[in-house]
Image: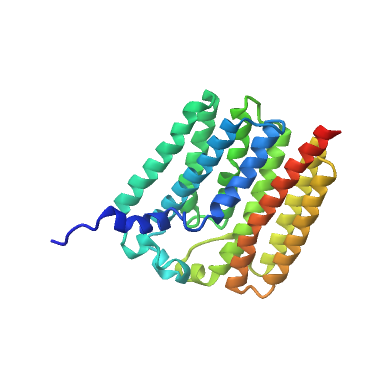
């Protein structure tokens, strides 16, 4: 009987399973969460709230990656980009992945002890979306919409955590982020479209077909319009407009590089969305500072 491999030697596989070596997903989830934390906190959230939501982002994104790879463990080996993932190769067993998922969710749940009880009920939606999302690509061409709902769920939670009811502004921000998520995850799905068609996995990239770039541009326009309204309602002024113009430039560049639909270019465009989130967060902070100084 072969001797078990020590955990420290397997640690890189678990890091890969949680995608901690590829933090782009953390960034894309973190920035909208921080938008909501600052807006719900009237530009001055407590350090405790910021820390709790930042830790929650890391834990829930990691948990989402684990359950996603568990759901895809039998198909990842047929996709060139994912063939070497730990579950697909057998370096990590399914039972181990489920235990890790449970531990990550439990760790995230422990953060709720430091928040109002109402946040607990909202957190159930976050867990439900994280669990069902990986399976949606088998039943619908809109798994990116479910991902958008999941990646936006921290927005109303940030309001509730700061003892505010999710209002129209909250849901406007939610819808903006959902549209943006569908746009950039469609870019991501475009890189896998040929393999997904072979193995029967569905996505918005397949649904949109030759209109994929137009659909992405439309969703980005929806995002920009919604975010303009968010800034206008908050009175963020010129700083917010600078962030929006920078975002427009970023979206134009993304549309240009994916024009040939080359997988590497689609991934490059997807990764660049981190800067959109960061720029708008900086613009949000600058807008609050501008308001406080007048």
Judged from this view, the residue extending furthest toward the left is: 1
- Image side of residue 18 versus residue 10, left or right: right
Figure check: 183 above or below 115: below
Figure check: 142 above or below 194: above
Residue 87 picture quarter: bottom left
Residue 273: x %, y % from top left: 65, 57
Does residue 63 show up?
yes
Judged from this view, the residue extending furthest toward the front is: 293
Along the line of sight, the residue nearer the viewer: 76 or 236: 236
Query: Residue sitting at 68 percent across and 37 percent down?
Result: 171
* Quadrant location of the C terminus in the rendered image: top right
Residue 37 picture quarter: top right
- Image side of residue 44 versus residue 191, left or right: right
* Quadrant location of the N terminus in the rendered image: bottom left
Along the line of sight, the residue nearer the viewer: 290 or 232: 290
Residue 285: x %, y % from top left: 73, 41
Residue 263: x %, y % from top left: 58, 72
Does residue 207 show up?
no
Along the line of sight, the residue nearer the viewer: 91 or 125: 91
Residue 132: x %, y % from top left: 47, 47
Figure check: 182 above or below 208: above
Residue 208 picture quarter: bottom right
Query: Residue sitting at 78 percent across and 49 percent down?
Result: 225
Query: Residue sitting at 52 percent across and 37 percent down?
Result: 125
Q: Please name the colour scheme applied to the rendered image.
A: rainbow
């Amino acid at each position: 009987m072969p001797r078990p491999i020590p955990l420290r030697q397997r640690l890189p596989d678990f890091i890969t399973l949680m995608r901690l070596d590829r933090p782009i997903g953390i960034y894309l989830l973190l920035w909208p969460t921080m938008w909501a934390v600052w807006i719900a906190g009237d530009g001055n959230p407590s350090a405790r709230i910021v820390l709790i939501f930042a830790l929650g982002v890391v834990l829930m994104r990691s948990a989402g990656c684990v359950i996603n790879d568990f759901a895809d463990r039998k198909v990842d080996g047929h996709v060139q980009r994912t063939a070497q993932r730990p579950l697909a190769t057998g370096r990590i067993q399914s039972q181990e992945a489920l235990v890790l998922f449970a531990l990550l969710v439990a760790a995230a749940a422990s953060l709720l002890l430091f928040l109002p009880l109402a946040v607990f009920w909202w957190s159930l939606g976050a867990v439900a979306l994280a669990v069902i999302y990986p399976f949606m690509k088998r039943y619908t061409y809109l798994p990116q919409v479910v991902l958008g709902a999941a990646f936006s769920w921290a927005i109303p939670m940030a309001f509730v955590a700061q003892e505010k009811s999710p209002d129209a502004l909250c849901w406007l921000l939610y819808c903006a982020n959902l549209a943006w998520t569908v746009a950039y995850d469609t870019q991501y799905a475009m890189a896998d479209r040929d393999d997904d068609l072979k193995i029967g996995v569905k996505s918005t990239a397949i649904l949109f077909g030759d209109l994929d770039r137009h659909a992405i541009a439309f969703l980005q326009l929806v995002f920009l319009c919604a975010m303009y309204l968010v800034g206008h309602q908050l009175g963020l002024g010129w700083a917010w407009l600078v962030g929006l113009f920078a975002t427009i430039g970023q979206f134009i560049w993304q549309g240009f590089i994916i024009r040939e639909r080359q997988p590497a270019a689609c991934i490059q465009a997807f990764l660049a969305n981190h800067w959109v989130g960061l720029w708008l967060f900086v613009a949000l902070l600058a807008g609050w500072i501008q308001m406080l100084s007048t």
